[in-house]
Amino acid sequence: MASSGGSRVAVGATYAAQGFGYATAVTSLPGLKDRVGIDDATVSIVILLCCLTAAGGSVMAERLAVRRGSHVSLLTGLTLQAIGLPLVALSTSPGMLMASFALYGIGLGTVDASSAMQGVQLQQRLGTAVLSTLFACATGASIAAALVMSGLATLGTANGAIASLVVAAVIIASIVLGVRGRLVPALEPAEDSLGATKSPLPTAGIWLFGSLIMVAYVADSAVSTWSSVYLHDNLAAGPVIAPLGYAAYQAAILLTRLVGDRLVAHSRARLLVPTVIVAILGLIGVSLLGNAVAVVAAFAFVGVGVGTLVPLTFSAAGDLAPEQVHQVIARINLFNYVGAVLGAVALGLLSAWPGLGPAFLLPAILLLPALLFARRFDRPGARPEPVPEPV
């Protein structure tokens, strides 16, 4: 059985695999668009399909984890991704592309849910905060994937996308082989599956923390989808400046997550409140500032809040019912995809009226409840004691 230190490295590697694969998939879309011959509307359908199948993958992760442990569902999801990404690369028709992305989406959702389960279980086993660092692994790997895509673009848009997808598949497959036997083991039946039949799930807590995850991904999707468009079309930023809003946002997320586990100390709420306030101010700045450079800085402010809100929410959710962590985390993870779609679609609709700038106030407003419910992140008895290592 793996030591806690070995499990920490192994779980971190799976977060990195998820981040690298997803960033490769989304940045390959321009090249795939040229290769397959599809328009922007079809790309939107592909992304929506991927979100829908990812939700199905999250449901599958719950069922697998309850029966066999989250380590099994995590390895299953990564394997599906390692199969799905090469199929995406080989796609030569819209139908094949959609089917391949659907398979990849199932793997994506399975890993989203089961990696969060593993992170929460590892945190409970260690008795110390680790989720922020784990999410930093995903963020850093996403940035690395974008750089790989940029480097392979010298092969041509389509060929570079194909090569990047193959590289991502090889990396994910290698991580699957490398972490087997080193992930956090399954909970004992008495703690998990039997407990699930005796105790009702904490529905109110699932809706509360799920809604906060949704809000975090509304903000994330809004920045990811619309920051470059807003800087270019509304603020007349040139091709050099326009992508920097998203780059600044991701850099702020990475830096915040790298230090988040140390800053959380004895209170999640004390970290949550100021960072969410910074994110709200950043979104207000995006909406009101008319200078492109200032707006780039404002997008970085948004990253500070999103960078802490996601790991802190999953951490708090894991304390709702530690004996039913698989079910709780899988169901909260479903809100992720609602937020991702809502953030992209809602801002697109609002861009017609009142305009894309004011539309960024929507995620700012939605973030306010996180401040109102901050005390729920630190309810008495929530913070776990270290779990002794099995003999």
Image (cartoon, rainbow, N blue to C red):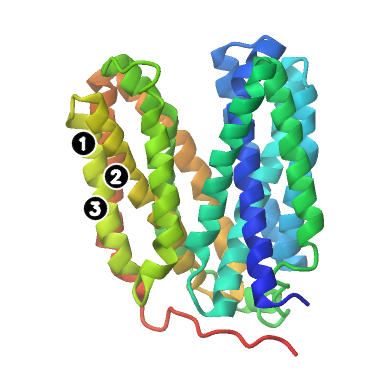
Residue 225 is tagged as none
Residue 54 position (above or below residue 260):
above
Furthest toward the bottom, the residue is 391
Q: Counting other residues with Cα less than 10 Å from the Cα at mark 2, is it few (<14), some (14-19), or many (20 or more)? A: many
Q: Amino acid at mark 1?
A: Gly
Q: Amino acid at mark 2?
A: Phe
What residue is disc 1 on?
285
Q: Counting other residues with Cα less than 10 Å from the Cα at mark 3, is it few (<14), some (14-19), or many (20 or more)? A: many
- Measured as percent of width and height from the top left, residue 55 is found at 61, 44
Task: Kindly check if marks 2 and 3 are in contact, taking CB atoms under 8 A apart as contact.
Answer: no
Mark found first going from the N terminus, 2 or 3: 3
Q: Counting other residues with Cα less than 10 Å from the Cα at mark 1, is it few (<14), some (14-19), or many (20 or more)? A: many
What residue is disc 2 on?
301
CA gap between label 2 and label 1 equals: 9 Å
CA gap between label 3 and label 1 equals: 12 Å
Q: Amino acid at mark 3?
A: Ile
Residue for point 41% across, 33% down: 246
What residue is disc 3 on?
277
